[in-house]
Image (cartoon, rainbow, N blue to C red):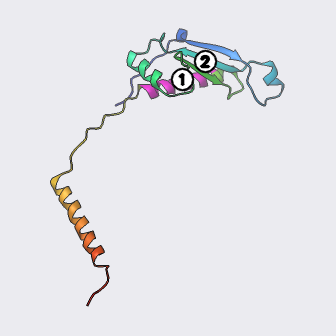
Amino acid sequence: MPTPLIRLREEEVEFTAIRAQGAGGQNVNKVSNAIHLRFNIAASSLPDEIKARLLTLRDQRISTDGVVVIKAQQHRSLERNRDDALVRLRELIAQAAFTPVTRRPTRPTRSSEKKRVESKVRRGVVKLLRGRVSE
């Protein structure tokens, strides 16, 4: 079953430009290229079942208050980091939107049970014949 197309409204996602960490020379010290994305699950327009599944996910990016915080600093440009953060948020939501098919337990057929028992008996006879030969 394909996951439904979920649209995120721009006003539900909050972006904050921050300075990136790590190597990068003067660029890292002067320019705020990294993005902090904040998305409040409870205040969003997502369907209630997806909200509930998102809150039960054991993901470190989801705080105890129900806010998704994603930090993107992979790229040198602010726009690419912003797009990267949005893609990661969409992947997280798609993960919560996917509902696995529930397994219905079935019983083995009479024929398969009979074959299983016969193979066990045959194997047992082989093992029995491995014993010492007595005269």
**Label 1 belongs to which residue?**
89
Q: Are marks 2 and 1 in contact (CB under 8 Å)?
A: yes
Secondary structure character of the magenta stretch overall: helix
Magenta stretch?
Answer: 82-96
**Label 2 belongs to which residue?**
37
Residue in the picture at 44% in, 26% down: 96
Q: Is residue 51 left or right of residue 113?
A: right
Quadrant that contains the N terminus: top left
Q: Position of residue 27 (x, y in %)?
A: 80, 24
Q: Is residue 122 left or right of residue 15?
A: left
Report helix, strand or loop for mark 2. Answer: strand
Quadrant that contains the C terminus: bottom left
Tell me the kind of residue under disc 1. Answer: Leu
Dot 1, how many residues are within 10 Å of its Cα: few (below 14), some (14-19), or many (20+)?
many
Q: Residue furthest front?
A: 135
Task: Report the number of discs.
Answer: 2
Q: Earlier in the sequence, mark 2 or mark 1?
A: 2
Q: Which of the 4 image quadrants contains residue 53?
A: top left
